[in-house]
Image (tube, rainbow, N blue to C red):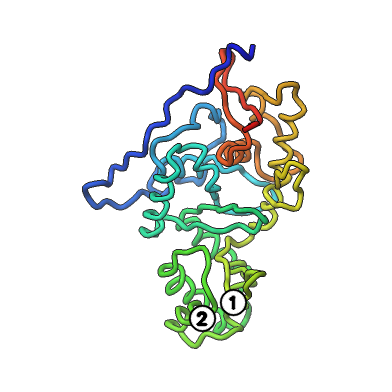
Amino acid sequence: MDSQRNEMAEPWPSYSSSSRGKKKRPRSPNDDATSSQGRTENSTSLGDNLIFSDTLIALQLMRTQFPKLEKVVTQPFILQSQLYSSVKDRTQVDRDLESLKKDRVLRVFKLNTGQDDHAIMFMDDYLKQMQSAVRRSTGKNKDDNEVFEWFEKYVLHSKLDVSIDHLELCSLLSHGGDATDKHITLLMNAGLLTRQLIDPNIYWFSIPSIGPILKGLSQKSFDHCGYGGQGRKEVLSLLNRRKYKEMLLSSLEKTRLRLSPLDVRFHLRDLIGSGHIKTVQTPTGLLVRVSTD
């Protein structure tokens, strides 16, 4: 059977932007009718929509396929590694992300997983997530709560990096009023900022209420091969238990994971993009195999 398998021959077209040559506002997920109700049903096979030539289209589709989570309310996000699994030209992906960030279409966040994980969230979704967090965290002192308006108006729209230092944060917030350490504590308690452990004067921008989801990606469950995250480890364990360390994608994506709140399709895209697994076309369908490179 191995002799009949050939590496996936489907072409990886280069990114072609329709906006080149004329200024055009990038489409947000709310521009698409299929996104008007949030997300579409995850009925389409991963193998039918694995490769894209357009970064924004890939992001929009992966947004609609974000798993429906139990007991956790969060707006959809996409891992940067997942994007790399779908658009071959990583340099072009990075350029497109920078352009989309500058156009305030999306934000990129460094995740607290102990690994080099970055999440991408459309700005409209992030603002909804932020508003939910603010409603949960606001207290009786309305004067202190105004810092959330300052944060959205003066910080989010001018600072596009994944982190910000204390002095710059205070400087930007001061455009709204007298910013104090108490105000910054409110932002941290709402989950909008996370202080770096190595340098306490630096803050990561963060996605509120995402903590329970990160156990599927967290480094806390590293195995001896260095694969971190309970969900990642579980998918790789399923493959490694097979004689040839491989499974048909159609069978694997039906698996219900026990150790991650995220679904198997989410982890498959991530593992393909990070190079831990690869896909191989066979007469019986697309095969997922543990990488040995």
Residue that numbered label 2 is attached to: 167
**The N terminus: image quadrant:** top right
Q: Is residue 124 left or right of residue 244?
A: left
Please rate how many residues cluster around mark 1, counting C-alpha atoms within 10 Å: few if below 14, some from 14 to 19, many from 20. few
The image quadrant that residue 286 belongs to is: top right
Give above or below for 75 relative to 197: above
Q: What amino acid is found at the position of numbered circle 1 in the picture?
A: Asn
| Kind of element beneath mark 1 | loop
Give above or below for 254 relative to 176: above
Residue that numbered label 1 is attached to: 201
Expressed as whole percent of the image width and height from the top left, the position of residue 57 reads 41, 41
| Kind of element beneath mark 2 | helix
The image quadrant that residue 200 belongs to is: bottom right
Q: Which badge, 2 or 1, is on the more N-terminal residue? A: 2
**Residue at 76% in and 48% down:** 221
Expressed as whole percent of the image width and height from the top left, the position of residue 165 reads 53, 75
**Residue at 40% in and 55% down:** 98
- Could you tell me if the residues under marks 2 and 1 are in contact, i.e. CB atoms within 8 Å? yes
The answer to which of 288 and 61 lies nearer the viewer is: 288
Q: Is residue 111 left or right of residue 16?
A: right
**Residue at 41% in and 67% down:** 157
**The C terminus: image quadrant:** top right
Q: Residue furthest left?
A: 21
Q: What amino acid is found at the position of numbered circle 2 in the picture?
A: Leu
Q: Is residue 72 visible?
A: yes
